[in-house]
Image (spheres, helix red, strand yellow):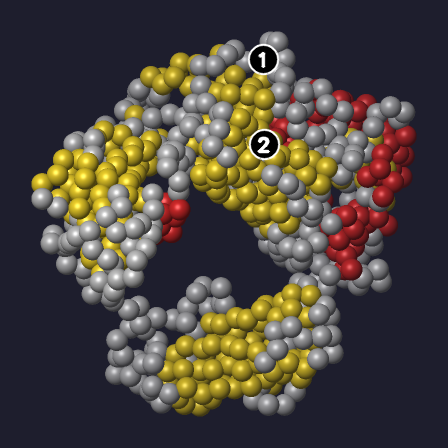
């Protein structure tokens, strides 16, 4: 327990109630849920508690001004049971901090946050390699808004000797989202942000909501590949069929798993289909005659596998294979688009993007370079340079995803939710477990729940069992002798995963139980009259994870604080001692005694846990009341009448405290310890103001530093002003000094002009030094926390 938490009890009015600790288990950071037609969205949430609460409440507040609309506190659940809560919060489209709090007797007892989370737009792409992203020198630009997101991992690999591409058919892992910046991957198939990060920025800029992408495009795939694998028939790459069929019914399995494991939780707006380059023949031969039938098959099968939800599709019109354009393919795609009642929208005509591969002719898109700073084409309606093929690809898609599309494409929003129950922290190999789960929403009558074993990172390991209702009995594999794992249940109708259980450790030698016991104190009157009794209460809490046993509390009274009575303590002179206490995890027990001040002055009363038979992970019993550990507590009160004396609880058994050790290395006569700092003369300039940065280089080592070079990196919206101590090199301000004696500092100045409104971060680093440094390395980035880096933020008004 923090010092703040201990002292806050001074203001609690008797009686005191137990505090429940709170952990949010869903949503995870950067999850975006699909907004509905009215612009609002429902975000399901869940978490774990260590004690009883009256209700759980949640609130959304924008990450930054203008990025959403703050909500009032909304009730998530009243009287949650089994130390789990679940429910939802509703908000308008935006980018938010989610705050969850627990309430007992109308008082807040715990609070936790997760950020950012979003209500916005969710897309999944399908088709062939141009729906995917190859990541081979494509110079993808990625998002510049920080509000476009994806799972930065893939589930496939290329075997040696030209064998068929392998992509896992296993159930999808628990997601971990990141900003879809340049070079980031997109689960399960994209090896770069491709054009999707840029496309997301167009949507963020237009609607002020965050975006998430999933990518299931597949190299060289025909529409027949997709239709066959959707119907359970393996297929091969038509360009290299001799390498064998693609395993795991790919490419369709990836689309199916994304819908069932991710879109079932987040909802979605549409599937973006970009495929046609691999088709061959003409209207009477090859793959083209069956294109319409095959694509309709894929669309309808995907909706069937998505619980019957009528998820819209947007079909791009594409056929160019690097040498040939096939109007017959475009006509077939248009026929699918024009099919009444199919809920398919017209996508971009991307055959029009000529010289798409960085200014050369090819089937694939590529940018010639990755300009710095980001060119922000989403803010600039002017023509994109011809050699920026991927950026032109993103703009074409944006032109099709117009306002009419968002008005007519009905989004799919989540309506079911489930949470896997808590399990023991430690289990033995081959143990039998009772897996419980709780649900919201309606599941089909024939629904089954599959129990899956996951590793500590949320990756699928195996299926343990299945059943129709909670609980389900399972047996762990006996060959798993150690390691951390978790369990999740997954429904079949509709298909969706529950929030996984807590982590548990499989071990043959369970560790000694640990109980995190803390102590707090309160007094009924902090300014009593002389000889007026006060009640002092001590609150013993166990935050687990295991039961606490044999706890004995000791309070040494200050001089002139006379003991009167107690049912919880025995008195020996001025030492009060409790009987042994046992506490379950997540519970609190109160002890009290009555005493009175017999002399004028201030009283500083202290108590501690004197004994415990359970192990505490962060404190030691009987170590004294002056070490700040959470198993001690203290408070002060004074008599109402004046008195200058101070009476303090004795502390005869204080364990010696260690000396404070600084983190600054001892000066080494053979090294120069160089650090930098950065200040600016105006952190809130107006547009066209010139601001002055001062970069100070210091040497706290024992050797003169030589050959020092520093580079600053101005944020977007600021331009370098020549003069002073810096010049431009590679587009960035660069300066330096030839030598810096030990124990001295030197300040260099550069200026910049504010050219655009907005928030920006100016960073700097030491890029070169001729002598070694004990705690930093030159030119290794500005975000590593080393003392040869610095940063300062500026907001242009």
- Locate residue 250, reporting x and y percent: 62, 29
Q: Are marks 1 and 2 in contact (CB under 8 Å)?
A: no
Closer to the chain start, of discs 1 and 2, is 2
Question: What residue is drawn where x is 47% and y is 82%?
Answer: 696
Residue 776 visible (yes or no) = yes
Above/below status of 586 relative to 781: above
Q: Quadrant of residue 261?
A: top right
Is 59 placed above or below 726 here?
above
Of badges 1 and 2, the one in the foreground is 2
Q: State whether residue 123 appears in this view.
A: no
Q: Find the residue positioned furthest to the left.
A: 573
Residue 208 in percent (x, y) is at: 74, 50
Mark 2 crowd level (few <14, some 14–19, many ≥20, 10 Å Cα): some
Residue 693 relative to residue 224: left or right: left
Report the residue marked by disc 1: 447
- Judge left or right: residue 34 versus residue 790: right
**Left or right of 450, for residue 192:** right
Locate residue 164: give its quadrant.
Answer: top right
Residue lying furthest top: 445
Q: Please tell me which residue is depicted at 79% across the width and 24% down the height of the picture.
A: 296
Q: Nearer the viewer, residue 257 or 321?
A: 257
Query: Which residue is denoted by mark 2 in the rendering?
Result: 75
Q: Quote the CA–CA distance across marks 1 and 2.
A: 29 Å
Q: Position of residue 247 (x, y in %)?
A: 56, 28
Kindly identify the residue that appears in the image at 85 percent across and 43 percent down.
Answer: 403
Identify the residue at horizontal 41%, vertical 68% (top origin): 786
Q: Nearer the viewer, residue 327 or 507?
A: 507
Which secondary structure lies at badge 1? loop
């Amino acid at each position: 327990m923090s010092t703040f938490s201990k002292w806050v009890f001074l203001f609690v009015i008797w009686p005191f109630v137990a505090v429940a600790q709170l952990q949010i288990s869903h949503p995870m950071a950067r999850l975006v849920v699909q907004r509905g037609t009215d612009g609002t969205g429902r975000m399901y949430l869940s978490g774990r508690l260590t004690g009883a609460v009256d209700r759980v409440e949640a609130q959304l507040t924008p990450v930054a001004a203008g990025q959403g609309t703050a909500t009032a506190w909304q009730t998530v659940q009243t009287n949650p049971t089994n130390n789990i809560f679940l429910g939802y919060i509703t908000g308008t489209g935006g980018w938010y901090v989610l705050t969850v709090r627990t309430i007992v007797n109308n008082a807040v007892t715990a609070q936790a946050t997760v950020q950012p989370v979003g209500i916005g737009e969710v897309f999944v792409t399908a088709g062939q390699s141009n729906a995917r992203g190859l990541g081979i020198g494509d110079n993808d630009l990625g998002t510049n808004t920080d509000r476009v997101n994806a799972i930065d991992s893939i589930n496939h690999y290329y075997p040696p000797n030209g064998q068929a591409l392998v992509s896992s058919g296993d159930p999808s892992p628990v997601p971990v989202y990141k900003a879809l910046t340049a070079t980031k991957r997109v689960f399960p198939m994209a090896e770069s942000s491709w054009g999707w990060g840029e496309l997301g920025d167009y949507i963020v800029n237009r609607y002020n909501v965050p975006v998430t992408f999933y990518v299931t495009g597949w190299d060289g795939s025909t529409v027949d590949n997709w239709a066959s694998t959707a119907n359970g028939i393996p297929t091969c790459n038509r360009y290299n069929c001799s390498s064998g069929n693609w395993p795991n019914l790919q490419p369709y399995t990836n689309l199916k798993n994304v819908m069932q494991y991710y879109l079932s939780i987040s909802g979605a707006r549409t599937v973006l289909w970009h495929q046609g380059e691999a088709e061959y023949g003409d209207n009477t031969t090859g793959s083209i005659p069956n294109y319409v039938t095959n694509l309709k098959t894929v669309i309808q099968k995907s909706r069937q596998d998505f619980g019957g939800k009528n998820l819209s599709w947007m079909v791009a019109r594409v056929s160019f294979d690097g040498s040939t354009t096939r109007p017959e393919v475009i006509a077939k795609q248009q026929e699918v688009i024009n099919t009444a009642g199919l809920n398919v929208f017209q996508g971009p005509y991307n055959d029009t993007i000529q010289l798409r591969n960085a200014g050369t002719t090819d089937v694939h898109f590529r940018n010639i370079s990755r300009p710095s700073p980001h060119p922000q084409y989403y803010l600039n309606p002017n023509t994109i340079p011809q050699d920026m093929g991927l950026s032109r690809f993103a703009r074409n898609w944006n032109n099709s995803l117009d306002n009419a599309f968002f008005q007519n494409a009905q989004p799919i929003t989540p309506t079911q939710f489930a949470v896997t129950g808590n399990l023991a922290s430690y289990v033995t190999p081959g143990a039998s477990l009772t897996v419980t789960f709780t649900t919201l929403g309606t599941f089909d009558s024939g629904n089954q729940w599959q129990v899956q074993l996951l590793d500590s990172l949320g990756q699928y390991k195996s299926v343990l069992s299945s059943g129709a209702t909670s609980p389900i009995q399972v047996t762990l594999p006996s060959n798993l002798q150690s390691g951390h794992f978790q369990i999740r249940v997954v429904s079949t109708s509709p298909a969706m995963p529950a929030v996984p259980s807590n982590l548990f450790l499989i071990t043959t030698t369970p560790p000694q139980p640990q109980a995190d016991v803390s102590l707090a104190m309160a007094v009924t009157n902090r300014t009593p009259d002389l000889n007026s009794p006060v009640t002092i209460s001590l609150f013993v809490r166990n935050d687990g994870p295991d039961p606490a046993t044999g706890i004995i509390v000791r309070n040494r009274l200050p001089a002139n604080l006379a003991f009167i009575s107690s049912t919880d303590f025995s008195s020996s002179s001025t030492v009060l001692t409790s009987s042994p206490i046992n506490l379950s995890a997540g519970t609190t027990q109160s002890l009290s005694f009555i005493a009175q001040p017999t002399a004028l002055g201030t009283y500083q009363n202290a108590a501690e846990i004197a004994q415990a038979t359970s192990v505490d992970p962060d404190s030691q019993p009987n170590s004294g009341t002056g070490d700040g550990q959470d198993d001690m507590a203290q408070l002060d009160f004074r008599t109402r009448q004046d008195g200058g004396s101070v009476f303090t609880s004795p502390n005869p058994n204080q364990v010696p405290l260690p000396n404070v050790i600084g983190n600054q290395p001892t000066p080494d006569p053979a090294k120069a310890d160089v650090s930098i700092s950065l200040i600016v003369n105006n952190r809130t300039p107006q547009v066209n103001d010139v601001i002055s940065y001062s970069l100070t280089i210091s040497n706290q080592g024992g050797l003169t530093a030589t050959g020092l070079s520093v580079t600053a990196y101005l944020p977007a919206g600021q331009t370098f002003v020549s003069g002073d101590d810096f010049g431009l090199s590679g587009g960035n301000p660069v300066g330096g000094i030839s030598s810096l004696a030990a124990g001295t500092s030197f300040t260099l100045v550069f200026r910049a002009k504010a050219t655009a409104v907005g928030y920006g971060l100016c960073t700097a680093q030491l890029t070169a030094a001729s002598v070694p440094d004990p705690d930093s390395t030159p030119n290794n980035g500005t975000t590593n926390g080393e003392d040869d880096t610095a940063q300062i933020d500026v907001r242009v008004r």
